[in-house]
Image (cartoon, coloured by chain):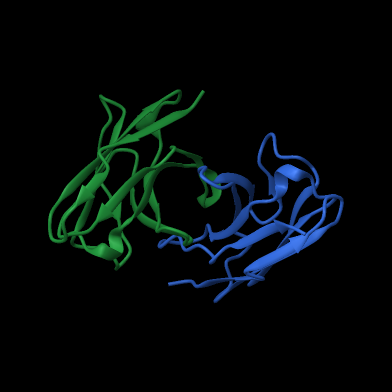
Chain colours: A blue, B green
């Protein structure tokens, strides 16, 4: 099974700042990396797939990058609604494994 | 508008069974693979099961293989998860999810809580 390791597990930032979350796959997933956002008490929401492709309706301050085993999610100019948990997911193969999550908190 | 509405959760004793349902609307249910994903309290996401669009193929992680069964009724646009031999570690919110392109879960239900405890 492909293991997904996210870092950091938590992150504190202020409105207007930029942050980066990283995700490391245990083997090459050929760009098949998915990012989700989950707000407290809510279901996850698809943000990015194919490592770099923004889902419809997702603001352009979110961006994804990476290849092979290393991937990143960057959020520019943080807005109050961006403080949430973020998960990466292996989109290449079954089992569909998730990273452990990153909780983005307001500083 | 895509809607996924789960039901059937609750409190159940270890070793007992429970069946979850997910009513889908707003898309052609029979054309898409569907999945269940769970989240233990204060923990991350764990994929639990996938079923192909026609229902002929199912997939599970080792943690639930042999105990959980995913199924679907395309005529009723409904997804199911039969959970047998439940354990305390199965306590979680269970989400129904539609599988989209490129290995994504592009729509999620609101989730249903399952608590396994004596």
Give the answer, above or below, for where B93 lies relative to B26.
below
Let me know if residue A66 appears in the view: no
Q: Quadrant of the N terminus of chain A?
A: bottom left
The foreground one among B62 and A6 is A6
Give the answer, above or below, for where B87 lies relative to A53.
below
Give the answer, above or below, for where A57 lies relative to A98.
above
Residue B48: name its quadrant. bottom left
Residue at the extreme left of the image, as rendered: B16
Residue at x-position 57% and y-position 66%: A29
Numbered marks: total: 0
- Residue B79 picture location, percent across and down: 29, 37
The foreground one among A88 and A67 is A88
Residue A101: name its quadrant. bottom right
Residue at x-position 50% and y-position 62%: A98
Residue at x-position 76% and y-position 40%: A59
The foreground one among A49 and A58 is A58
Q: Quadrant of the C terminus of chain A?
A: bottom right
Residue at x-position 18% and y-position 47%: B18
- Residue A79 picture location, percent across and down: 79, 45
- Residue A80 picture location, percent across and down: 76, 44
Residue at the extreme bottom of the image, as rendered: A26
Question: A55 left or right of B98?
Answer: right
- Residue B10 picture location, percent across and down: 25, 44
Let me know if residue B112 appears in the view: yes
The foreground one among B72 and B82 is B82
């Amino acid at each position: 099974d492909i293991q997904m390791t996210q870092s950091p597990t938590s992150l504190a930032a202020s409105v207007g700042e930029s942050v980066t979350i990283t995700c490391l796959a245990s083997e090459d997933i050929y760009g098949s990396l998915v990012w989700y956002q989950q707000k407290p008490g809510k279901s996850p929401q698809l943000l990015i797939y194919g490592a770099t492709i923004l889902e419809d309706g997702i603001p352009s301050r979110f961006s994804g990058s990476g290849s092979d085993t290393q991937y990143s999610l960057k959020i520019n100019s943080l807005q109050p609604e961006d403080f949430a948990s973020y998960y990466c997911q292996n989109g290449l193969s079954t089992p569909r494994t998730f990273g452990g999550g990153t909780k983005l908190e307001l500083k | 508008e895509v809607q996924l509405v789960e039901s059937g959760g609750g409190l159940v004793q270890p070793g007992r069974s429970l069946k979850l349902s997910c009513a889908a609307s707003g898309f052609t249910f029979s054309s898409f693979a569907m999945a269940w994903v769970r989240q233990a309290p204060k923990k991350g996401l764990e994929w639990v099961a996938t079923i192909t669009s026609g229902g002929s193929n199912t997939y599970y992680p080792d943690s639930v293989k042999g105990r959980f069964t995913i199924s679907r009724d395309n005529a009723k646009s409904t997804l199911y998860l039969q959970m047998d031999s439940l354990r305390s570690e199965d306590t979680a919110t269970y989400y129904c999810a539609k599988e989209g392109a490129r290995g994504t879960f592009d729509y999620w239900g609101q989730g249903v809580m399952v608590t396994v405890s004596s």
